[in-house]
Image (cartoon, rainbow, N blue to C red):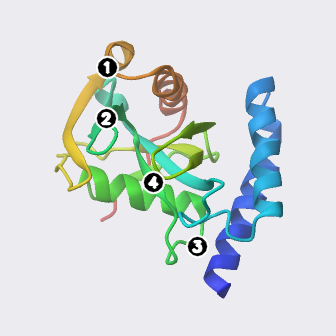
Amino acid sequence: MSAPADGLRADAERVLKQWRSQAADPEQEQLRQEYLRHIADRPDGMWKACSAGHITASALVVDPLNDRVLLTLHRKLGMWLQMGGHCELGDTTLAGAALREATEESGIAGLTLLPGGPLRLDKHRTPCAWHLDVQYAALAPEGAVETISEESLDLRWFGYDEVAEAADESVVRLARLAATAATVSPRPDPLP
C-alpha cells in the first residue's frame, strides 16, 4: 500500500473516531462502528476493488441563499442523488475526496465544504458492492452554474421542500441536515 493510500485510510479512521460526538442517533453510531471495523479489518477497504464493500465520499451541493440543493440524476443508478463516489489514489482526505467528487460531477468551481466534518453516514448497495458513504455538504458560490458530467443524465436544483418528491429518504435526511448546517455556518469569503 502506498503512502498516500495509507494517509487516506488514516484520515478516514480519524474522521470517524472524531465524529463520535456528533453521532447521537443510534443508527448513525452503529454505522460509525461498522465503518471503523471495516477499515481495521480490510487493508483494501477504501477502494473500489474491495468486493466486500468500500468507503465512499459524497457531498450535497447547497445554495443557502436560494434555499436549494443540487442533485444529479445518476447515469448508472437512474436516481436523483448528491454528488459522490469512490476514493481515488490521489485523495489524501475523505473531505478532499467528497469535494473532488462534488466539483467533478457538478462542474462548479469554488465549492467549499461546510465546516465541522461529515453530516451523516449511509450504507447502500450498488452494482459494484456495498458503499459505506461518508456524506458532507458543499456550499455553492454565489451565481454558481452547473455543468452535466459524463456520470450524470441531468443536474437540477431542488428547493429544500422539493427533495422528498425526487429523491430517496437518505438524500432527504442529508438535505435536511445540510439546510440546517448551511444556515448556521458562515459563508466563506470568496477568493480574491
Q: CA distance from mark 2 to mark 4?
A: 14 Å
Label 2 element class = strand
**Amino acid type of disc 1?**
Ala
Question: Which mark's residue is nearer the viewer, 2 or 4?
Answer: 4
Q: Is residue 126 left or right of residue 51?
A: left
Residue type indicated by callout 2: Leu
Tag 1 near tag 3, CB within 8 Å: no
Cα separation, mark 4 vs mark 1, equals 20 Å
- Do tag 1 and tag 2 residues touch (Cβ < 8 Å)? yes
Report the residue marked by disc 1: 166
Quadrant where the C terminus is found in the figure: bottom left
Mark 3 Cα shell of 10 Å, populated few (<14), some (14-19), many (≥20)? many
Expressed as whole percent of the image width and height from the top left, the position of residue 151 reads 26, 52
Residue on which the image places disc 2: 71
x 55%, y 53%: residue: 56
SS assignment at label 4: strand
Left or right: where 35 falls relative to 54: right
- N-terminal label among 4 and 3: 4
Q: Nearer the viewer, mark 1 or mark 3?
A: 1
Residue 92 percent location from the top left of the image? 58, 73
* Residue at the image point whose x is 55% and y is 43% from the top: 135
Q: Nearer the viewer, residue 92 or 145?
A: 92
Sequence-wise, the earlier of marks 2 and 3 is 2
Q: Earlier in the sequence, mark 1 or mark 2?
A: 2
Residue 189 visible, this orientation: no
Could you say whether the residue bearing mark 3 is in a helix, strand or loop? Answer: loop
Label 2, label 3: how far apart the Cα atoms are: 25 Å
Q: Is residue 32 above or below residue 182?
A: below
- Mark 4 to mark 3 CA distance (whole Å): 15 Å
- Residue designated by label 3: 92
Residue under label 4, please give it: 85
Circles 4 and 3: CB distance less than 8 Å?
A: no
